[in-house]
Amino acid sequence: MLVGRLAPTPSGLLHLGNVCAFAGAWLSARAADGRLLLRIEDVDRERARPDVEQALRDDLAWLGLTWDVETPRQSARDYAPALARLAPRLYRCQCTRAMRAAPLPDGAGCQGRCDGKGYATGAVRFRLEAGSLSFIDCRWGPQHADPRRFGDPILVRRDGLVSYNLAVVADDIDDGVNDVVRGSDLLEYTAVQMQLWSALDAAAPRWLHTPLVLGADGRKLSKSHGSAHVGAMRDAGATPADVWRLVLPWLGIAGATSLAEAVPRWEPSGGPLGPITVSASGADL
Ligand code: GLU
C-alpha cells in the first residue's frame, strides 16, 4: 500500500509552495487509495513554535488537506537507535566556521580538514560513499548526482540537537513511508538522503519533487512574501476554491476548484517542472 506523508515544519506559516507540495502528497495518496500521515517536523526545537503549528493545522483544515493518522512529532522521538545503526559511518567533526567557509577540499569528507582525527566531541557527520548516485524522480525523471559535492551531512549538531537530515529519513523509515512528495528545493539533496536510507537497510521511497514556487523577486517563498501565505489570502477574502484554481495547474490539473475533483486527473509527472513565480501582491487570485 502506498504510504505518503504531510511533513510540515512549524517554524513558518503555510505558503503556496507548501500547498503545492502537500497537494501533491495528498493527491498521490488518495489516487492510489493509500494512507496519508501527518508528522510535525519540529526536530529543530529552537525554531519550532506552537502558535505557528496551530496556524498550520488551521490552514490545512481550511484547504481540506486531511490525513489518516498523525505519527509522533519529531521532538518526541528517539534517534539513538538510528545513530547506533549508522555508527560505522559516523565521525566527529570540529571544523570551525572559517574552515567550513573554505572551498570543499577534493575528496574530503567534511567541509573542513578535521576529518578522521578521532575527536571525542563536535558535530556528528555521516561519511558519504564516493561516486555518483542515480534515482528516478516521478516528475524530473532520472537524476544523477555526486552526493559528495554537498560534503558529509551533519546528523547531530555540536550542541547535541539531531538534524533534519537524520530525522526525516529515520522517521520516514519508522513510519513506513514509501512515497515522498516535497518541494524541488530538496531534489539534489535526495542523493545524500538515499545513502542514509541504504545505510539504514531500507528500500528508498518513490520520489516526487513538486515545482519550486518563487516570489516576484525571484526568491523562494518565505516570511517576506506575506501575501503568498494561505492565512493572508484567507484574510483577504480568498476561498479554498481560489487557492486550488491557482495551485492545481502547477501539478498539471487546470480548471479544478477542489482536491476531490482533482483526484481522478492526478498524474505524478503532470504539470510544469517549474519554477513558478507568483506576484507578491496576491494578484494571482
Ligand atoms: N519538513 C520538511 C519541509 O518542510 C519536509 C520535507 C522533506 O524532507 O521531505 O520541507
Image (cartoon, grey):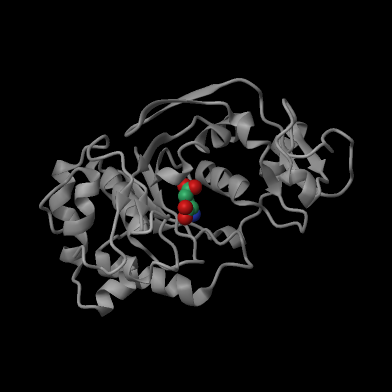
Q: Which residue ends up furthest to the top in the rendered image?
A: 131
Spot occupied by residue 149 in the image (x, y as percentages of width and height): 62, 32
Residue sitting nearer the eye, 40 or 284: 284
Which quadrant: the C terminus? bottom left
Which quadrant: the N terminus? top left
Q: Is residue 281 above or below residue 203?
A: below
When asked about the image quadrant of residue 103, the answer is: top right
Q: Residue at x 76, y 31 (%)?
A: 88
Q: Is residue 229 left or right of residue 52?
A: left
Q: Is residue 49 above or below residue 255?
A: below
Q: Residue at x 10, y 52 (%)?
A: 255
Spot occupied by residue 70 in the image (x, y as percentages of width and height): 43, 59
Q: Is residue 191 above or below residue 45?
A: above
Residue sitting nearer the eye, 33 or 167: 167
Residue sitting nearer the eye, 274 or 61: 274
Spot occupied by residue 204 in the image (x, y as percentages of width and height): 48, 32
Q: Which residue ends up furthest to the front in the rendered image?
A: 217
Q: Residue at x 78, y 39 (%)?
A: 112
Spot occupied by residue 241 in the image (x, y as percentages of width and height): 16, 64
Please indicate, yes or no, whether residue 199 appears anywhere in the rendered image. no
Q: Residue at x 45, y 59 (%)?
A: 8
